[in-house]
Amino acid sequence: FLILTVLKFPAHLALSHVLASLLLLGAAMLFWKREQSRYATFFYAMSGYAALSVAIIARFESPDFFVWLSWQSIVVISTAIWFRSKFIIVANFFIFLLILLAYVIVAGKVSTVSIGLGIVALLSARILNWQKDRLELRTDFMRYAYLVTAFFIFPYALYHSVPEAYVALSWIGVSVFYYLMSVWLKNNKYRWMALLNLILTVLYLFVMGSSQLDPVLRVVSFLILGVVLLLISLAYNRMRMKRETKAPNPPESN
């Protein structure tokens, strides 16, 4: 089908593959609903996703289509949850990594658009956590994998797209974002991500900032980092005290 459309209908390549994607995904839904066939569903669904990828590549210029391909990952995960397919989830993660690697190689210069790749990784982890019972996943491996991917994407993307003087400040902003996520979702994973990202920021300031940053900006970055560390420490101490206050006292022994 791909060869036929490229040779016969090159002007309508994107539209034809969007239609093919809808038909194949419809077939996957039909097989799942009627026969609960995991393998047939996997085959038709992956073929539909492949057709959609071709449509994206045909519609957008390089390297912009890599970002759109990464957002397609959200569509894949959402439909995979409906299919209850662990195979699609695992395959999608490795395809996402290939897209990320291809973007870094082909794009040459990483821009702020690449931050979208990190957002996709975070959203993918949240969707998997939200629907983990429906997918019947026995481990947190895939969610951890997406979170680790996001953890590395954000500093890398910001390092290459933000002016050098503001790299540390942007990384501090990412740490604050992780901390707010940990409070909002009551999830310790984001707290660890915030802590590790702050440690990465400290290392950057000591190694790179001491020689390349303007002295004033270096001092300001250290001050902001110290304030953020102090506020986070105070906030967590307050939360811990609240938990200890609400915890029931053990019964006294006679």
Image: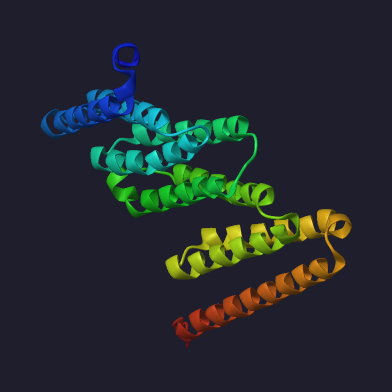
Question: Residue at 45% of width from left, 83% of height from top?
Answer: 246
**Residue 140, percent across and down?**
45, 47
Question: Residue at 24% of width from left, 37% of height from top?
Answer: 83
Residue farthest along the right direction in this orientation: 211
Q: Is residue 147 visible?
A: no
**Residue 117, percent across and down?**
51, 45
> Where 109 falls versus 178 (above or below)?
above
> Where 134 falls versus 215 (above or below)?
above
When asked about the image quadrant of residue 199, the answer is bottom right
Residue placed most toward the observer, 238 or 178: 178
> Where 214 falls versus 238 (above or below)?
above
Residue placed most toward the observer, 42 or 68: 68
In this rendering, position of residue 148 left or right of residue 13: right
Residue farthest along the left direction in this orientation: 34
What quarter of the picture does the N terminus occupy? top left
Q: Tell me how the rendering is colored.
A: rainbow
Callout count: 0
Residue farthest along the front direction in this orientation: 11
Question: Residue at 41% of width from left, 43% of height from top?
Answer: 71
Q: Is residue 228 visible?
A: yes
Residue placed most toward the observer, 163 or 191: 163
When asked about the image quadrant of residue 79, the answer is top left
**Residue 89, percent across and down?**
38, 37
**Residue 141, percent across and down?**
47, 43
In this rendering, position of residue 221 left or right of residue 118: right
Question: Residue at 60% of width from left, 46% of height from top?
Answer: 111
